[in-house]
C-alpha cells in the first residue's frame, strides 16, 4: 500500500474525482473553458495529496496538502460558476459540496500538522 492510500482524505478526493467525471460528461457542449478548469482542479486534489504524503519533511508535506486544499476550494468556486451559468442546478450539487467541505477540512488539518 502506498502512503497516500492510508489517508482518508485521499479516498474522498478520489470519490470526488469520480463524481465530477460523471458531472463533466453530462455538461452540454460549448463550455470547454470551465470544463477544462474543473478537470485540472479536480485532478489536482488527489495528485497533490499523494505527492504530499510521499514527501519527507514537515514543510514539504504541508505545502502539497495546502495546494490540495486550494484546488478543492477552486472546485467549489467552479461549481458556483456552473450554477450561475445555469449549467447545473444547485440542488443537484448538495452531495458534491458536502464532499468538498470534508476534503477542505481534512486537507486543512493535514496542512497544519
Image (tube, rainbow, N blue to C red):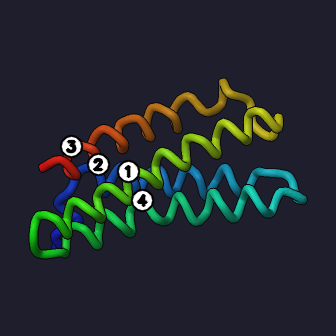
Local crowd at mark 2 within 10 Å, few (<14), some, or many (≥20)? many
**Labels 2 & 3 near each other (Cβ < 8 A):** yes
Q: Is residue 94 above or below residue 48?
A: above
Rounded to the nearest angstrom, the CA distance separating label 1 from label 4 is 7 Å
- In percent of the image, x 28 and y 73: which residue is there? 51
Tell me the distance, in whole angstroms, between the alpha carbons under discs 1 and 2: 5 Å
Where residue 41 sits, quadrant-wise, is bottom right
Q: Earlier in the sequence, mark 1 or mark 3?
A: 1
The residue tagged 2 is 107
* Residue corresponding to mark 4: 45
Query: Secondary structure under badge 2?
Result: helix
Of 27 and 62, which appears nearest the observer? 62
Indicate whether 58 appears above or below 77.
below
Alpha-carbon span between mark 3 and mark 4: 15 Å
The residue positioned 72% from the left and 40% from the top of the image is 81
The image position of residue 17, as x and y in percent, is 50, 57
Q: Are marks 2 and 4 in contact (CB under 8 Å)?
A: yes
| Residue to which mark 3 is pinned | 109
User: Rounded to the nearest whole Å, what is the CA distance between mark 2 and mark 4?
Assistant: 9 Å
Q: Of callouts 2 and 4, which one flags the residue occurring earlier in the amino acid sequence? A: 4
Crowdedness of circle 1 by 10 Å Cα count: few (<14), some, many (20+)?
A: many
Residue 28 lies, in percent from the top left, at 85, 52
Front disc: 3 or 4: 3
> Distance between the Cα atoms at labels 1 and 3?
10 Å
SS label for mark 3: helix
**How packed is label 3: few (under 14 Cα within 10 Å), some, or many (20 or more)?**
some
| Numbered label attached to residue 69 | 1
Q: Is residue 53 left or right of residue 67?
A: left
Image height of 92 relative to 5, above or below: above
Give yes or no for contact between labels 1 and 2 (Cβ–Cβ under 8 Å).
yes
Amino acid at each position: 500500500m502506498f502512503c497516500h492510500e492510508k489517508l482518508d482524505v485521499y479516498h474522498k478526493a478520489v470519490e470526488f474525482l469520480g463524481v465530477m467525471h460523471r458531472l463533466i460528461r453530462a455538461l452540454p457542449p460549448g463550455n470547454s473553458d470551465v470544463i477544462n478548469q474543473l478537470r485540472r482542479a479536480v485532478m489536482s486534489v488527489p495528485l497533490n495529496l499523494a505527492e504530499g504524503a510521499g514527501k519527507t519533511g514537515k514543510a514539504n508535506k504541508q505545502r502539497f496538502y495546502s495546494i490540495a486544499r486550494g484546488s478543492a476550494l477552486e472546485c467549489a468556486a467552479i461549481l458556483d460558476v456552473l450554477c450561475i451559468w445555469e449549467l447545473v442546478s444547485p440542488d443537484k450539487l448538495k452531495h458534491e459540496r458536502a464532499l468538498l467541505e470534508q476534503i477542505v477540512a481534512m486537507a486543512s488539518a493535514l496542512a497544519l500538522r
